[in-house]
Amino acid sequence: MNFSLPAGLLNRKGSAAAVPLPSTAFGAAGAAVSPPGARADARPATPKVAIAKPASPDFIRIDNVVKKFGDSVAVDTVSLSIAKNELFALLGSSGCGKSTLLRILAGFESATSGRVFVDGEDLATLPPYKRPVNMMFQSYALFPHMTVEGNIAFGLKQEGASKAEIRERVKDVLELVQMGRYAQRKPHQLSGGQQQRVALARSLVKRPKLLLLDEPMSALDKQIRHKTQLELVSIIDKVDVTCVMVTHDQEEAMTMASRLAVMSEGKIVQVGTPSEVYEYPNTRFSAQFIGSTNLFDGNVVEDEPDHIYVESPDLETRMHISHGITGPLGMPVSISIRPERVVVSVTKPEGAVDNYARGEVSNIAYMGSYTLYHVKLASGKVVVANLSSSRLMRDGAPAYGEEVYVSWSASSGTVLTQ
Ligand SMILES: Nc1ncnc2c1ncn2[C@@H]1O[C@H](COP(=O)(O)OP(=O)(O)OP(=O)(O)O)[C@@H](O)[C@H]1O
Ligand SMILES: [Mg+2]
């Protein structure tokens, strides 16, 4: 199962203040957390495709970009704004058009229609050597016969920079990526993470205004991946550069990016900070792609300004959601409940009338700091709960096969209509 808590807590330049996410808890002890400025009840009832609205003026503006290869549409009418000094991630599964969009930003690929502006200039009108962009490719092959220093100096030499300038700039950038003492090594004498930093230095030495990273961690194994992600964020934070990165790894996007766009089949499904997208997914696709979730399909059976009730064939009780939506009575919806919002108890939750169900523990997966409980309901639906392992140790852990109750608060559900 693909579950991981979002780690997007880095308070990066150009980003909204990071919002602490609920800690993994035995049940939904963590109160609902809203993104800055959001009302607790302001969940999207009729989700729309979000268009980014950064606080500062647009540094990159992608305007209705379409890219077709023959009959197939790789990028489908994408509009997006990215602010200066953001680290923005394009996130989506394989083949959804991430690299194609990045290549259009780099100017390597021309859009079939639509336009891209970088710092107010239409990219299509600039000759390649005048584009303030540098791209680090999905496989960032360094020149194997050159030293670290030689690899980094290569682009500057081609530009005809003076020897003194090259020496100075290479030294500075090596210091930035903390690779000064490896200057004379060849790439094969470096670890994967060190090679990755050299590749980054090679991109940064040309002082691009826009740095594009295509799957920058793809060559790294899981252990050094996380360390390198944080290093890369801190390096990029130190220089005056706007960065767009592509990844299919949601945890990576959440760890590194100030904002991200979820892509599917060439389209942008949602744009927001990691916590906004996690807490307020606008579609079933976003809810399932970012983290994992419990989705209950049902129909609205009571619709009041400040709350709704939804009946789902998966549950014996109605679902109470503590905010209103815009839509007719009877409308089909899905309710997304994150596993860390689900409480598991051996007795019926006190006073509970709705938002609970009985079931049997059908699987227990110990994951270290948290434990995933699978609870199979009478309807056959399996509800996943993410429980704090230390709390389970303290309060007692329900056993495999034991009858339990799952429950959640009225503010835990996100209503999805798409
Ligand atoms: N030069 C090309 N000619 C024809 N089709 C292409 C070309 N480049 C990409 N495509 C198609 O466009 C779609 C998007 O490809 P793209 O490389 O942008 O995906 P991606 O999101 O980067 O995937 P991955 O995560 O696997 O790298 C795919 O269906 C791909 O086959
Ligand atoms: Mg790609």
Image (spheres, rainbow, N blue to C red):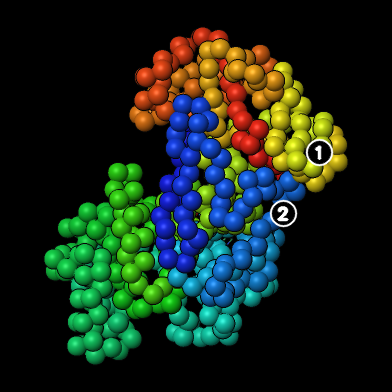
Q: For the point 63% across and 45% down, which residue is it?
A: 40
Residue 18 image position (x, y, % from top left): 46, 54
Quadrant into which the C terminus falls: top right
Whether the residue under disc 1 has CB within 8 Å of ligand 1: no
Height in image: 299 above or below 254? above
Using the rendered image of the protein, determine whether residue 289 is visible from the camera's viewpoint.
no
Task: Bin the neighbour count of mark 1 within 10 Å (Cα to Cα): few under 14, some 14-19, many 20 and up.
Answer: few
Q: Which residue is mark 1?
A: 304
Q: Amino acid at mark 2?
A: Lys
Q: Nearer the viewer, residue 20 or 190?
A: 20
Which label was assigned to residue 418?
none
Q: For the point 23% across and 87% down, which residue is it?
A: 165
Height in image: 347 above or below 51? above
Q: Which residue is mark 2?
A: 48
From mark 1 to mark 2, how far is it between C-alphas? Answer: 22 Å
Q: Nearer the viewer, residue 9 or 157?
A: 9
Using the rendered image of the protein, determine whether residue 88 is visible from the camera's viewpoint.
yes
